[in-house]
Image (spheres, grey):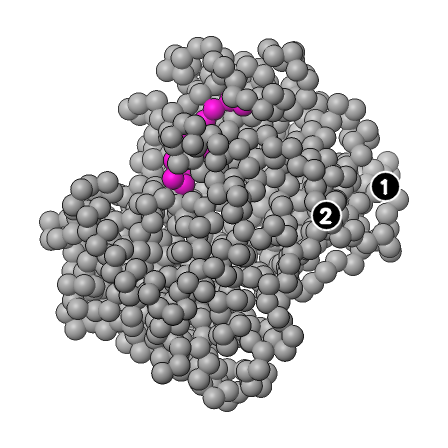
């Protein structure tokens, strides 16, 4: 493939004829949006498959047999639920014994449909910030988990309205905490005090539009009068606060996100907030977390324990990027942490996350993009130099290979302490893969468990929405432009003849409609998932799915991500091109039958890839995308992503960004496969102007393009199941119109 040259179109604001489309709610811009929406509706909603697809998607989304995700709050388990009768959704709760039943006896806590109707607002649920049972007397006199800050979004935007809610009465608290719409971050410092970062006027936000200041806000006082207790710089991404209410370990802290991957962390020596603010020594690009008396450090780059930022007791040791280290917090605060490595990455093995029970640390590990779980415990040993050792404990056999997530149920604020909590060693396991419906299991890791029995208890099983008999999944590898081997999954529908060959081996007739999906950024891993909607809309109609694990993602740890950031971003697109070529060489598909789909950073990926190799694809679905990389850092949250892409205002950075920036690559004579671009007016993360301007330029050049912009939905593209079903029906109608027979 020839090296793409520098961009010529719209290289500055002065010669960008479509800047007016960045006016999100401008009359002219919205008129233009309505015209484009009407064109897409006329082209796709009248197709014979559209209504059937929409009804199938809605049936899947509204399915009452899907697994309700739960969150423990005290002795109850809460769930947010949407279906045909509850379009905006219900926040509800029940006991764990009740949840085990086929029809749990849910108690409604908040009916969002009723609230939206009563207040005339298009509320979208964005979660709740729970108030822990602080040891001091609550102002309301109620013990336990009794209050929450509800986060309500207008139309699905990231910006939320915060309102204090009483979990006992199920009502908003009169004269309680209330904050208007903003990208607010808040946490409870005590029963009557919040640590709040919000838009309080000039100087309160970073260049990325996130909080720059943290205020200590006392109940009954104006937020503007609350003292600023922590502050970052305008060029930071954001600042945040956290509070640990665990008895015996009460503390608070702050963090400055210098960019998307670097931070500086600070500890408040007292939850009351009157103590010393102490820097927590760590490398800026490492993630630090505290648990009781321990500090965990997750590395993005190699660390020698002789470094000035992390002086360690004993001889210097080199810990590779991707490792997880642990040390007593007291030693870290003294400046001499005795780091012990719990996890060491491998070429195809990475750490995906961790969680704590009352006694164990559980590591979620990806090995060849399949999940494993490791269990570690601090074992007291009076004869050991440190008074004990970290030991890896056995685990019962868990389902796999596929995607397994771990959710511990331990309540660190249980009134009787860890020993009295009946769920101190309990966890929920959520398993799925491409052909296996989601299942939710409960596992108890009691004190005497040796991993030789007592396997998980099945709590819930998702409905099987498509017949998987005869289907199969392969993991293959494609050789990218620089020689790197890049993995991808192929999900074959039943009845499609293909041999289990590799790159370059003829194993099909090249006539299978195939959808290639990828992301390739921000250290995000694409693991196997069960898509009932895709099963009905794609597999059942003979479609092949390919999921690409591109560089820039996190499948193989920090090095896999860092291989495709900044000046190396092109490698994500090279990887996608290599997979598309491999699919065609091996006879899986041919260009007119290969579709490409991605959203957000993945929307940038599919547009850049299709512009560089339009000959490889028959259709492109580009969702909530970044596309104008000359101005991305000036639009909404774009400045926060410069650690991923670079700074377009620096000539050196623009030199590499301009080589792939889709909006700037659109010049007379360029070729592109037919495209459908989708976004949302209420997306306040990735500006809808990216997609709007791209479509306007494509139309100007006479290239085939359709566009759909949802009025609601935020960065997710839809606010409720009906909107989601309509959007998906448009997308798959478009794909079948281009990749289907004929």
Real-space CA distance between mark 1 and mark 2, rounded to the nearest whole angstrom: 30 Å
Residue 501 pos. (x, y %): 56, 84
Q: Is residue 249 left or right of residue 682?
A: right
Q: Quadrant of the N terminus?
A: bottom left
Q: Quadrant of the C terminus?
A: bottom left
- Which range of residues does the magenta coloring cover? 151-165
Along the viewing direction, whichever of 698 and 539 lies nearer the viewer: 539
Q: Decide: is 231 above or below 4.
A: above
Secondary structure state at the residue bearing disc 1 = loop
Can you tell which quarter of the image residue 345 is in? bottom right
Q: Indicate yes or no whether the magenta region holds residue 152.
A: yes
Q: Dot 2 surroundings within 10 Å: few (below 14), some, or many (20 or more)? A: few
Along the viewing direction, whichever of 584 and 464 lies nearer the viewer: 464
The residue indicated by pointer 2 is 102
Secondary structure state at the residue bearing disc 2 = loop
Residue 447, label in figure = 1
């Amino acid at each position: 493939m020839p090296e793409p040259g520098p961009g010529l179109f719209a290289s500055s604001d002065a010669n960008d004829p479509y800047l007016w489309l960045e006016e999100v709610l401008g009359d002219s811009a919205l008129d233009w949006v309505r015209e484009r929406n009407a064109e897409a509706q006329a082209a796709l909603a009248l197709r014979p498959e559209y209504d059937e697809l929409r009804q199938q998607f809605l049936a899947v989304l509204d399915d009452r047999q899907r697994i309700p995700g739960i969150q423990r709050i005290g002795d109850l388990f809460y769930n947010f639920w949407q279906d045909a009768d509850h379009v905006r959704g219900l926040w509800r709760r029940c006991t764990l014994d009740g949840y085990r039943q086929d029809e749990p006896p849910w108690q409604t806590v908040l009916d969002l449909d009723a609230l939206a109707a009563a207040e005339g607002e298009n509320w979208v649920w964005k979660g709740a910030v729970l108030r822990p049972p602080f040891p001091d007397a609550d102002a309301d006199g109620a013990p336990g988990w009794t209050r929450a800050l509800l986060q309500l979004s207008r139309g699905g935007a990231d910006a939320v309205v915060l309102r204090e809610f009483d979990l006992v009465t199920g009502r908003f608290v009169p004269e309680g905490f209330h904050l208007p719409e903003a990208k607010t971050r808040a946490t409870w410092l005590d029963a009557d005090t919040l640590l709040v970062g919000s838009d309080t006027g000039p100087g309160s936000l970073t260049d990325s539009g996130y909080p720059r200041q943290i205020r200590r806000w006392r109940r009954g006082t104006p937020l503007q009068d609350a003292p600023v207790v922590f502050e970052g710089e305008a060029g930071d991404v954001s600042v945040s606060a956290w509070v640990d209410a665990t008895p015996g370990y009460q503390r608070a802290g702050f963090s400055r996100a210098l960019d998307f991957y670097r931070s500086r962390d600070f500890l408040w020596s007292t939850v009351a907030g009157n103590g010393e603010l102490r820097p927590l020594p760590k490398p800026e690009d490492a993630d630090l977390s505290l648990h009781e008396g321990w500090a965990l450090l997750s590395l993005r780059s190699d660390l020698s324990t002789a470094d000035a930022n992390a002086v360690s007791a004993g001889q210097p040791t080199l810990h590779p990027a991707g490792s997880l280290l642990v040390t007593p917090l007291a030693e870290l605060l003294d400046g001499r942490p005795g780091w012990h490595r719990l996890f060491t990455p491998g070429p195809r093995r990475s750490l995906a996350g961790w969680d704590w029970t009352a006694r164990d640390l559980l590591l979620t590990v990806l090995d060849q993009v399949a999940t494993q779980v490791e269990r570690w415990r601090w074992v007291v040993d009076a004869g050991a130099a440190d008074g004990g050792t970290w030991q890896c404990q056995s685990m019962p056999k868990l389902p796999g290979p596929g995607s397994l997530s771990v959710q511990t149920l331990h309540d660190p604020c249980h009134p009787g302490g860890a020993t009295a909590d009946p769920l101190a060693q309990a966890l929920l396991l959520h398993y799925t893969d491409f052909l296996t419906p989601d299942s939710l299991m409960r596992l108890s890791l009691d004190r005497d468990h040796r991993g030789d029995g007592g396997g998980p208890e099945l709590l819930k099983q998702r409905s099987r929405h498509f017949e998987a008999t005869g289907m199969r999944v392969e993991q293959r590898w494609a050789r990218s432009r620089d020689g790197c081997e890049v993995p991808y999954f192929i999900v074959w529908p039943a009845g499609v003849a293909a041999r289990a060959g590799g790159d370059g081996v003829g194993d099909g007739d090249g006539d299978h409609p195939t959808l290639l999906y990828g992301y390739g950024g921000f250290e995000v891993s694409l693991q196997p998932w069960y898509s009932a909607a895709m099963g009905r809309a794609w597999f059942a109609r003979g479609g092949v799915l390919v999921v690409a694990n591109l560089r820039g993602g996190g499948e193989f740890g920090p090095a896999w991500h860092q291989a495709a950031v900044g000046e190396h971003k092109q490698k994500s697109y090279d990887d996608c091109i290599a997979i598309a070529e491999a699919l065609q060489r091996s006879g899986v598909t041919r260009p007119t039958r290969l579709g490409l789909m991605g959203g957000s950073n993945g929307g940038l990926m599919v547009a850049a890839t299709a512009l560089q190799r339009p000959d490889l694809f028959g259709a492109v679905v580009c969702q909530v995308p970044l596309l104008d990389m000359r101005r991305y850092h000036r639009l909404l949250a774009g400045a926060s992503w410069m650690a991923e892409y670079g700074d377009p205002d620096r000539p050196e950075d623009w030199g590499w960004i301009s080589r792939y920036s889709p909006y700037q690559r659109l010049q007379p004579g360029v070729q592109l496969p037919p495209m459908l671009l989708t976004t949302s007016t209420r997306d306040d993360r990735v500006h809808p102007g990216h997609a709007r301007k791209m479509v306007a330029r494509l139309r100007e050049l006479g290239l085939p393009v359709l566009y759909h912009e949802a009025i609601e939905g935020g960065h997710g593209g839809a606010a409720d199941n009906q909107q989601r079903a309509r959007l998906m029906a448009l997308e798959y109608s478009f794909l079948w119109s281009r990749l289907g027979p004929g």
